[in-house]
Amino acid sequence: MIRHDDPKTALPEFAHLLTGYRIAVNEIDGTELLEMYKEAGLLYEQKLKMLGNHLELIRSNWDRALRSPDDLFTVVTCSDDRGAWAAISMWRAAEETHAMQSLVSNGKNPYATRAAVVAAYRHLWGIGAQYRSSWYRPEHPVAADFGRRVALDHDNTAAVPLDYCPYRPSGDTPSAGIDIEPVHGTLTDDQLRLIADSHGPLFAAAGHLTGPDPRCNEFNRTWGRCGLFRYQVPLVAYARSRLVGIAVCQRGAFGVSPSLLENKCDLILDHTADQAVQRRTAAALLHRAREVYQDFPDSPIPVMSHPRSRHILDGLGLHRTRGYVEMITTRAGFRHACQAVCDSYLDRNQQQRQDA
């Protein structure tokens, strides 16, 4: 990745918001990050149950990625002299895309949290990131307010609602009449249109699906330099030569995302097809995806699909446990996104003063 600016001087119009705070990048290790997540309540009971006995593996993966010189995993921390702290983590999901996630704090100073977000955007700008992706739960009022404001930049941001459906492979059999083919070269225009229809206009580009290496073989070697991995396997489904579905099976170092989204399977169906065909397509894609996840730890595979597919997946026993909005912003939208976050904090502070 080509570095454009020193992250300490990038996006200078926001620099004043960091005054009075100590900003640090990757000055903690996996054990300290785990403790911060526990203190902030990010690792609540349901999530701890999902992660099971894998916390040591996750901590080890964090340590490996944090030591990488390739910006694979970044933790920005912010603290003040009164004991307030906030942290935000980012992991490199594709060659030019970083996933921004897990914004946590001890709740003592909301402006320390704002400063952490600003510092994270400055860091992404400085290292030359071209896309920023994130996921938020729409029922979370603060995250939803951030998301709504950022999404107003329609030219540079795409926000798509998705269902999270945990999938435990069983002894199911492949569906008759559906042909599944793994993609090794460039995706066709029809395949890219189907992806855009389900997951928005920026998903393919940010996910490295528009070029000649959609499986991210070269990028996987970058992760391999620290003993980890990151690749994806696109699967396409046809019914009598008609494209009816795609699964993008992503694989990465377990737990880089505390919600395991580094290993999500994006299930994309042609919603104009007959419902029986959609059901067989979903079943066939999930059956074939089992091969990609055969070494996945004992935890459900995170399947992400458009809400239009909910009744199809319900019929297969995959039930939505929570909803996300996936937001992707291009580099041209970083300034707007950063400003939107700042405005959100300012407006909420003014409202709190009025209510007091």
Image (cartoon, rainbow, N blue to C red):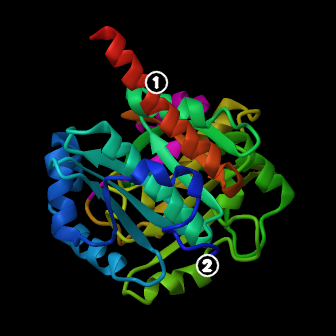
* Disc assigned to residue 1: 2
Image coordinates of residue 187 in percent, x first then y, are 77, 65
* Disc assigned to residue 347: 1
Mark 1: give few (<14), some (14-19) or many (20+) Cα within 10 Å.
Answer: few
User: Quadrant location of residue 215?
Assistant: bottom right
Instruction: Say which of 319 and 333 sits in front.
Output: 333
- Circle 1 SS class: helix
Measured along the vertical axis of the image, is residue 138 above or below residue 134? above
**Residue at 32% of width from left, 53% of height from top?**
20
Q: Which residue range is magenta in the image?
A: 299-318
Image coordinates of residue 85 in percent, x first then y, are 23, 50
**Residue at 78% of width from left, 55% of height from top?**
191
* Direction from residue 56 to residue 109 in the image, left or right: right
Asked if residue 315 can be seen in this view, the reply is no
**Residue lying furthest top in this view?**
355
Amino acid at circle 1 = Asp
Instruction: Say which of 66 and 24 sits in front.
Output: 24
